[in-house]
Image (cartoon, rainbow, N blue to C red):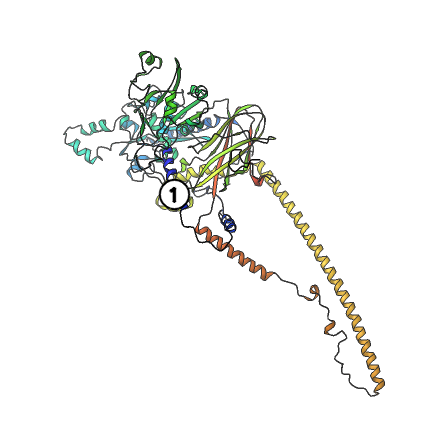
């Protein structure tokens, strides 16, 4: 039973709530005899990492550095330009492989995704992720397209929704997206851009993190049945038949045509586009396990470069407007997917082993919205199950009383268990909870994007890093704030999950003008649609980081470097490619601006230093002048006292001579010319030695070291907060001169780090 990612998320959140309740009842740690506020202050002081940052290179760093961007301010380019470049590169790569194979007379074997060697060697790097394994995923053989299909054709009467049959992988979301794409001409052709079926090489392009990238594969596909020589049990039974062509019969029965494939396949026995596209999508993401579980809208984004908004049926304000403006534009301006039962097991998580059905509709399973019609007062939608079977069994289902020959003709419908069914608009809103609406962009649209990395605090608030948009003419605008798609490097996702929000403010206005559409399930990006007048706008970001139970990237790399080298290299390349966006590469303009800023800072520091030196010198001069003045005064007083003492002594000696003519020795011959001890003058500035603060500094340093050691010990006991998110802003508009730049606190003026006002519906806002 395939489950969408939403079902997995539901299970995660349920288990998380259980964990949180157990944590709240845990015995608190013993505390020192300190004031409660001091305990809290010390906790937050040691909460954040002393060495914040994010790993941006998993593999050994290359000496080659990518060229820096031309400017820090980016302008728009045609939304299709990135696609055209990726398409051209893909065709060139396929041509080069063709020539190489022709010279060597060898069919192409993908050295980076050789599923045959990988399966038979037991590595399973093409099936399992770096950390995730799926023991139920057990293909039993691998063959080339030319060995599986009798008359292989990439397309048989073009790609259609009826071609799509999901295999033994949980990628119903991708299959539903492909079914939806077949409604618009040439959308599948835009993905499959180059191929040489004789050589066995195929080139595809997918949209990833705001730009198109190509993927090359060979024509090997997984089979459900093993080769005759490898089929131990089956071979014994077939050998008992005793026919000379037993092996050929076995191969034709079990290893021939679309039904022999293990994963997705086309309904036609000789059509190949679907399994090859699925293989390319799996290779782009690293393995087949990585594409299990997801949302239709995200897959449509990857296949078209569109922008998806999440709509919950219970949140629709005006259902009449939703029908006319949204659903009636199916396959025109928008593509739609839908699902239901996201939290179907929340009340009794252990009661149901598998998701249930709701009148034939499977819970936690993706469906395609193929068409919407309003005829004779009836509003009806045509949906498709990517399994190619299992349909809605309520009103307007196959064989229901609503069908008449006239309605069969009006809707061009035929009964059959093919996964295609009609449902009324009312039942559609009642039975389906979650809708993915993807907007498509043509050549009239331009796209401007900029990426940056930022430290996400534990407290949820608007970040001081901001994006600035300048619009030169009135234009419809679609603004998308996204984070890196972690599906491409699962196993190296780190310890934090991020939820994105943003709002837009216009220069000179007090209040914001719009916030992003809220997403309940999809976390890869959030967006907002609006028409902007010429002017300058600021995009403020609010990012919520949640710590999850994943190992750190450093731990994973150290653990897998020896045992799973090839897989780590494969996922590590994808990780490094994605996180190159986090590197703030300097353009010439940015370098000049940085040098100017650094020169100003150095000049300011020099001026401050000179000011301090001057003030210190003046203080020392005043102190020395005062000291010398005191010394001169003391010397003067001492000399006066000495003269007075000598005069007294001389007078006394003269008196003694008159009374005694013979010379006698004076009793006070040892007396000093200066005054006695009681006349000694003490001045701390003159008589005390110069005070040295070395001992006190050493004591303070030792105390600081002890504090740091204590903090380090606290960090060892509980991992510090170190949430770093790589985010990008994409702006789709019809203004080719629209410009976008990012400003971090260190690049702005003083005051840039001040907090932005809370949203008006934030529960922390006080009424004025």
The quadrant in which the N terminus is found is top left
Q: Which residue is mark 1?
A: 19
Give SS at disc 1.
helix
Residue 33, compared with residue 209, is above or below; it is: below
Of 441 and 750, the residue lying toward us? 750
The quadrant in which the C terminus is found is top right
Q: Residue furthest bottom?
A: 662
Q: Is residue 759 visible?
A: yes
Residue 747's x, y, as percent?
58, 39
Q: Is residue 286 visible?
A: no
Residue 333, compared with residue 590, is above or below; it is: above
Of 580 and 228, the residue lying toward us? 580
Compared across the picture, whether 197 is left or right of 54 comes to: left
Q: Residue at x 42, y 38 (%)?
A: 573
Residue 267: quarter of image: top left
Compared across the picture, whether 613 is left or right of 277 comes to: right
Q: Residue furthest right?
A: 658
Q: Give the mark count.
A: 1
Q: Residue furthest top?
A: 406
Residue 151: quarter of image: top left
């Amino acid at each position: 039973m395939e489950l969408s990612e939403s079902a997995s998320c539901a299970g995660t959140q349920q288990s998380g709530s259980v964990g949180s309740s157990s944590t709240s009842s845990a015995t608190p740690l013993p505390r020192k005899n300190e004031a409660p506020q001091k305990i809290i202050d010390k906790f937050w002081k040691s909460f954040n990492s002393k060495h914040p940052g994010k790993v941006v290179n998993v593999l050994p760093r290359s000496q080659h550095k990518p060229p820096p961007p031309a400017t820090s301010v980016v302008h728009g380019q045609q939304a299709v330009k990135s696609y055209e470049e990726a398409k051209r590169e893909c065709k060139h790569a396929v041509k080069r492989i063709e020539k190489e194979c022709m010279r060597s007379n060898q069919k192409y074997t993908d050295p980076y995704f050789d599923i045959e060697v990988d399966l038979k060697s037991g590595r399973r790097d093409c099936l399992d992720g770096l950390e995730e394994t799926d023991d139920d995923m057990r293909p039993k053989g691998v063959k080339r397209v030319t060995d599986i299909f009798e008359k292989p054709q990439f397309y048989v009467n073009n790609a259609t929704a009826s071609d799509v049959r999901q295999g033994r992988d949980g990628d119903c979301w991708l299959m539903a997206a492909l079914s939806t794409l077949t409604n618009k001409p040439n959308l599948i052709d835009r993905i499959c851009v180059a191929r040489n079926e004789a050589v066995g090489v195929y080139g595809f392009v997918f949209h990833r993190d705001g730009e198109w990238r190509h993927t090359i594969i060979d024509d090997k596909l997984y089979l459900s049945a093993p080769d005759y020589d490898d089929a131990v049990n089956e071979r014994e039974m077939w050998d008992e038949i005793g026919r000379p062509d037993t092996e050929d019969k076995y191969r034709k029965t079990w290893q021939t045509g679309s039904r022999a494939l293990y994963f997705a396949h086309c309904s036609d026995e000789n059509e190949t586009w679907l399994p090859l596209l699925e293989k390319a999508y799996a290779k782009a993401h690293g393995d087949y396990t990585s594409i299990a579980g997801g949302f239709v809208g995200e897959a449509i984004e990857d296949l078209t470069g569109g922008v998806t908004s999440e709509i919950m049926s219970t949140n629709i304000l005006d259902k009449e407007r939703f029908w006319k403006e949204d659903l009636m534009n199916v396959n025109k301006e928008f593509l739609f997917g839908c699902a239901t039962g996201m939290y179907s097991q929340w009340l009794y998580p252990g009661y149901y082993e598998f998701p249930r059905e709701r009148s034939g509709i499977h819970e936690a399973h993706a469906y395609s919205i193929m068409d919407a019609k309003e005829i004779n007062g009836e509003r009806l939608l045509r949906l498709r199950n990517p399994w190619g079977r299992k349909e809605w069994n309520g009103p307007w289902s196959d064989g229901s009383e609503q069908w008449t020959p006239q309605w069969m003709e009006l809707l061009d419908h035929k009964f059959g268990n093919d996964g295609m069914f009609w449902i009324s608009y009312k039942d559609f809103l009642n039975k389906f909870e979650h809708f993915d609406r993807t907007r498509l962009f043509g050549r009239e649209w331009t796209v401007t994007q900029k990426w940056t990395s930022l430290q996400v605090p534990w407290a949820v608030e608007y970040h001081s890093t901001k994006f600035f948009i300048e619009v030169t003419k009135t234009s419809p605008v679609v603004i998308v704030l996204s984070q890196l798609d972690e599906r491409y490097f699962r196993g190296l996702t780190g310890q934090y999950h991020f939820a994105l929000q943003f709002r837009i403010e216009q220069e000179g206005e007090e209040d914001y003008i719009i916030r992003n559409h809220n997403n309940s399930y999809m976390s890869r990006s959030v967006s907002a649609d609006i028409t902007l007048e010429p002017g300058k706008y600021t995009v403020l970001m609010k990012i919520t980081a949640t710590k999850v139970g994943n190992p750190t990237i450093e731990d994973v790399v150290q653990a897998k470097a020896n045992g799973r080298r090839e897989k780590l290299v494969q996922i590590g390349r994808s990780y490094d490619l994605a996180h190159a966006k986090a590197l703030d590469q300097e353009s010439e303009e940015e370098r000049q601006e940085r040098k100017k800023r650094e020169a100003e800072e150095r000049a300011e520091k020099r001026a401050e230093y000179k000011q301090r030196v001057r003030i210190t010198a003046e203080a020392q001069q005043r102190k020395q002048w005062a000291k010398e003045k005191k010394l001169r005064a003391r010397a003067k007083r001492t000399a006066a006292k000495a003269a007075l003492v000598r005069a007294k002594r001389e007078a006394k000696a003269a008196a003694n001579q008159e009374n005694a003519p013979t010379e006698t020795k004076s009793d006070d011959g040892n007396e000093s010319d200066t005054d006695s001890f009681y006349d000694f003058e003490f001045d701390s500035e003159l008589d005390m030695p110069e005070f040295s603060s070395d001992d006190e500094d050493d004591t303070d340093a030792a105390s600081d070291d002890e504090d740091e050691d204590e903090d380090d010990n606290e960090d060892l006991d509980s991992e510090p907060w170190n949430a770093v998110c790589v985010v990008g802003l994409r702006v789709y508009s019809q203004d080719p001169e629209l410009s976008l730049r990012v400003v971090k606190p260190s690049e702005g003026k003083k005051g840039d780090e001040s907090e932005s006002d809370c949203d008006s519906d934030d529960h922390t806002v006080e009424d004025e």
